[in-house]
């Protein structure tokens, strides 16, 4: 049975226990994928700063996020070294590409969708790191995941606050609702390869 965690209202469906079982049975792969996720998250923040350099508030907020994501990348890599897991490529699950496909190509819609999609990914990461913290049979690793949860929550909140800073709140909420449906549909069927977002 899943440990009850605070509900993230924007997520349409909670993670299934099948994912928890899959993740716990494949912790080394989950750790390697987590390393990739932290590196990608830093890259997303940097890319948005390059694409929208005149948005001062966004640049300030995402500078801090990129720095923190790189710190997490280093921390996860330390776990990989401790467990003798080499840094190596992993085929990504369809989740990220599926969400990116929903981002509209024209501005300013592209900016809005990019903020909201990134926030959804961070929200799902927060939920899943919480599940790993609650169910991981290794106390030290569980503590590590518990320590990362607050950062993930802060990150998704920042992306959504930025969306509401640059766009009308009603438009933001309507689009977030639409994207959240897609996000849950992408996770409705468990991907056969264990990943943070599988």
Image (cartoon, rainbow, N blue to C red):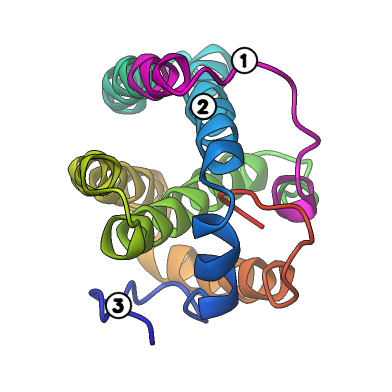
Magenta extent: 73-99
Query: Does the magenta segment cover residue 86?
Result: yes
Task: Give the labeled residue for mark 2.
Answer: 35
Is residue 48 within the magenta segment?
no
Residue depicted at 43% across the width and 15% down the height: 54
Q: Percent from the top left, x then y, of residue 30?
A: 55, 43
Q: Nearer the viewer, residue 81 or 7?
A: 81
Q: Are marks 1 and 2 in contact (CB under 8 Å)?
A: yes
Which mark identifies residue 7? 3
Q: Is residue 183 left or right of residue 53?
A: right
Task: Say which of 58 and 26 sits in front.
Answer: 26
**Under tag 2, what secondary structure?**
helix
**Neighbourhood count class around disc 2 (C-alpha, 10 Å): few under 14, some 14–19, many 20 upward:** many
- Does residue 67 show up? yes
Few, some or many C-alpha atoms within 10 Å of disc 1 (few <14, some 14-19, many ≥20)?
A: few
Residue 113 drawn above or below residue 64: below
Residue identifier under label 1? 87
Secondary-structure class at tag 3: loop
Screen quadrant of the N terminus: bottom left
Q: Nearer the viewer, mark 1 or mark 2?
A: 1
Q: Earlier in the sequence, mark 1 or mark 2?
A: 2
């Amino acid at each position: 049975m899943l440990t009850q965690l605070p509900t993230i209202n924007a997520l349409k469906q909670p993670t299934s226990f099948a994912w928890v079982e899959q993740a716990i049975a494949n912790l080394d792969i989950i750790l390697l994928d987590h390393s990739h996720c932290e590196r990608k998250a830093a890259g997303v923040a940097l890319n948005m700063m390059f694409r929208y350099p005149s948005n001062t508030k966004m640049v300030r907020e995402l500078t801090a996020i990129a720095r923190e994501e790189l710190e997490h990348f280093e921390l996860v890599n330390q776990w990989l070294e401790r467990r003798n897991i080499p840094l190596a490529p992993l085929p990504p699950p369809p989740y990220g590409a599926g969400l990116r496909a929903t981002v509209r190509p024209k501005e300013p819609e592209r900016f809005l969708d990019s903020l909201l999609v990134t926030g959804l990914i961070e929200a799902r990461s927060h939920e899943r790191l919480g599940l790993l913290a609650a169910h991981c049979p290794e106390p030290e690793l569980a503590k590590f995941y518990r320590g990362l949860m607050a950062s993930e929550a802060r990150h998704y909140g920042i992306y959504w606050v930025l969306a509401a800073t640059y766009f009308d709140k009603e438009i933001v909420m309507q689009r977030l609702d639409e994207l959240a449906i897609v996000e849950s549909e992408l996770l409705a069927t468990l991907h056969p390869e264990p990943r943070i977002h599988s």
